Amino acid sequence: MKLLRSGQLVRIGGVSRVTDPWLVEVIGAIGYDVVWLDLEHRDFGIEVVDGISRACRLAGIDLMVRVEKSGYHSPMQALEFGANGLMIPHIRSAEEAAQWVEWCRFPPVGKRGLDGAGADSHYGLDPILPYLEHANRETFLAFQIEDKEAVDQIDAIAAVPGYDMLFVGPGDLSLSYGVPMQFDHPLLEQAMVKVNEACERHGKWWATTSGSAAAAQHVVDLGARMFTAGGDHGALINGFRQSFESFREVALPDAAPGCTATAAEAGSFVRPY
């Protein structure tokens, strides 16, 4: 929040496969500003937030958790386990946005319930009234725009008070527009322009994913102030692919006996499609 308020860019490192806290420390040491932990699409649950949030605090970076879109319980636990921010997938209307503000903000902004003994209040060490004010002011709330109907209602969604950011999800949005994974399609470009204009009118920031530095620069030029700058899933796949390609040159001497077929030629792995 401090970086955004001071007009600086925010760079996100994604965590969706390796949930060991050491990786978060590394991400922070490298220089990232935010860790994005994805609970929507993975097989781990809310229990990983506690350890990752501690590592974020140690590294001095924020933790944004994309929660399951399953109701009040989902954001409550993520916040009390130490998330600095929440990402809510597939917000499609102003009414839906207002409901999540109600769940995630303390009165008078919303109707979030008070425990006051979680990581977000230093386990009860913080005085309650300053804690309530700090939580409403500094915990950022991002709503994902991933559907055509959301773009059609973007001004009404952006006008809802009590949250901070719209986060364009280009993958699902491209599916919704019928142009799967065509991230440079004019329909997606127009959608991001509409999001930027609505955010400017209503005092919100917006963000999105980016697959390259050039893509990140493009969305920043459009008005985005937060973007993804890599993640563990892609790093693992690309790292193993590059390593395998570099070791592919290792070969048996010409005179060596035995089978010379590669694994692919031997049929050791067959894709189901």
Image (cartoon, rainbow, N blue to C red):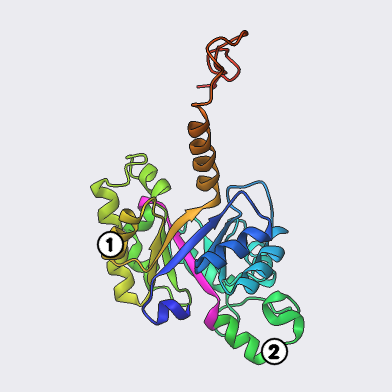
Q: Residue at x 66, y 54 (%)?
A: 19
Q: Nearer the viewer, residue 58 or 259?
A: 259
What percent of the width, then of the height, locates residue 162?
48, 77
What percent of the width, then of the height, locates residue 16?
58, 51
Disc 2 crowd rating (10 Å Cα; few below 14, some 14-19, many 20+) is some
Q: What is the span of residues highlighted in magenta in the rendered image?
A: 137-148
Q: Is residue 45 placed above or below 162 in the rendered structure? A: above
What percent of the width, then of the height, locates residue 266?
57, 12
Q: Nearer the viewer, residue 6 or 143?
A: 6
Instruction: Residue type at mark 2: give it.
Output: Ile
Q: Residue at x 49, y 34 (%)?
A: 246
Asked if residue 32 is among those painted magenta in the image, a careful observer would answer no
The answer to whether residue 246 shows anywhere in this view is yes
Q: Nearer the viewer, residue 73 or 26?
A: 26
Q: Please give the label number shown on residue 194.
A: 1
Asked if residue 146 is among those painted magenta in the image, a careful observer would answer yes
- Counting residues from the N terminus, which is met first, the one under dot 2 or under dot 1? 2
